[in-house]
Image (cartoon, rainbow, N blue to C red):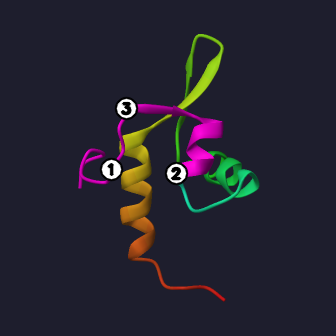
Amino acid sequence: MTPEQAGLQKIAYRVREALNILPCGKTKLYQLIKDGRLKKRKLGRSTVLLASDFVTLLEEIKDEPDVP
């Protein structure tokens, strides 16, 4: 699936914007970055996350077993 197919309109999002897209909170988002499951990039002084990385992450987790 491409970011466009997933309904994402931009190629990169700031962290605050990503919180409105991904089904997690700020703590979990930063944990995903720390664990290397999402890669943050710097654009000037802004930290951005690529839309394609969101799609990759969501495709990976759909195959993981649910953990209580």
Residue visible at 36% across and 43% down? Answer: 52
Residue 37 visible somewhere in the drawing: no
Whether residue 56 sits left or right of residue 1 in the image: it is right
Which amino acid type is marked by label 1? Gly
Q: Position of residue 65 (x, y in %)?
A: 48, 84
Inspect the magenta stretch and tell me whether residue 4 lies in it.
yes
Q: Mark 2 highlights which residue?
A: 21
Compared with residue 33, is residue 60 higher up or lower down, i.e. above or below?
Answer: below
Answer few, some or many: residues within 10 Å of disc 2's Cα (few below 14, many 20 plus, some between 14 and 19).
few
Q: Is residue 51 magenta?
A: no
Q: Nearer the viewer, residue 60 or 49?
A: 49
CA separation in Å, label 1 and label 3: 11 Å
Q: Which residue is mark 1?
A: 7
Establish if 67 lies above or below 24: below
Dot 1: element: loop
The residue labelled by disc 3 is: 11
| Circle 2: residue type | Ile
Which residue is rendered at x = 36% and y = 64% of the image?
A: 59
Numbered range of the magenta stretch: 1-21
Numbered circle sitting on residue 19: none
Amino acid found under the numbered disc labelled 3: Ile
Q: Which element carries disc 2, helix, strand or loop?
A: helix
